[in-house]
Amino acid sequence: MKYKNDEFVKDHSERDWDGYGAEPLNLKSYEWACSFIDAWPGDVPLPELCCDPDGEVSLDWPMRINTCLSASMSDKGVLAYAFYLSDRNNVNGACEFNGKTIPIHFMYVFEMVCAENGVKL
């Protein structure tokens, strides 16, 4: 694992880190997320790391005001993602990350969301 963020781990390592009863950071989820970032293409914008109240790590790509592609990494390497495209078109799903290669399906969704939001890759 090349990517790591000690400050992120420190800030989310204790129960109630958010003041609302959040679970501490799930270190397996964090390790999977770091491996995901290591595998992410170098010419594509990196996600922001966030900690969910259940302790899992979210990878977020802000697009426009109040618009974001968000993917939550489980402690088993399952990436669950969601994005609201329009009144009639939402994107959500899940795929398994093998620890080395970004799932093709997720990259397709990422490219589609970027195109919808005018983000050039």
Image (cartoon, helix red, strand yellow):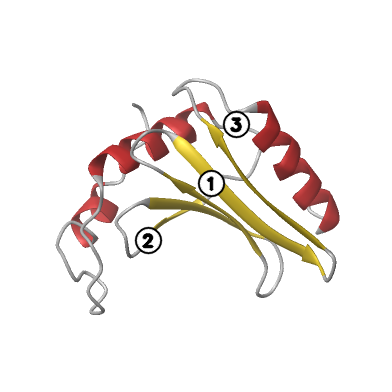
Q: Check disc 2 and give the amino acid type.
A: Asp
Label 1 crowding class (10 Å Cα cut-off): few <14, some 14-19, many 20+?
Answer: some
The x, y position of residue 62, in whole percent, is: 62, 61
Tell me the quarter of the picture where residue 111 sits. top right
Return the x and y of residue 25 as percentages of the image width and height.
Answer: 25, 53
The residue nearer to you, when weighing 5 against 112, is 112
Within 10 angstroms of label 3, few (less than 14), some, or many (20 or more) residues? Answer: few
- Using the rendered view, name the quadrant where residue 101 is placed: top right
Disc 2 to disc 1, C-alpha distance: 13 Å
The residues tagged by marks 1 and 3 sit, at their Cα atoms, a distance apart of 22 Å
Check disc 3 and give the amino acid type.
Gly
Name which residue lies at 33% across and 42% down. Answer: 29
Residue occupied by mark 1: 80
Residue kind at label 1, given as amino acid type: Ala
| Callouts 2 and 3 close, C-beta under 8 Å | no
- Please tell me whether mark 2 or mark 3 is closer to you in this view: 2
Q: Which residue is mark 2?
A: 52
Question: Does residue 105 sit above or below 48 in this rendering?
Answer: above
Q: CA distance from mark 2 to mark 3?
A: 25 Å
* Tag 1 secondary structure: strand
Q: Is residue 64 left or right of residue 69?
A: right
Nearer the observer: mark 2 or 1; the answer is 1
Q: Quadrant of the C terminus?
A: top right
| Residue that extends furthest to the left in the rendered view of this protein | 14
Q: Which tag, 1 or 3, sits closer to the chain's start?
A: 3
Mark 2 and 1 residues: CB-CB less than 8 Å, in contact? no
Pick out the residue farthest to the bottom. Answer: 19
User: Residue, x 53% and y 46% (percent of image)?
Assistant: 80
Residue at 80 percent across and 59 percent down: it is 117
Res. 42 mark: 3
**The residue tagged with tag 2: helix, strand or loop?**
loop
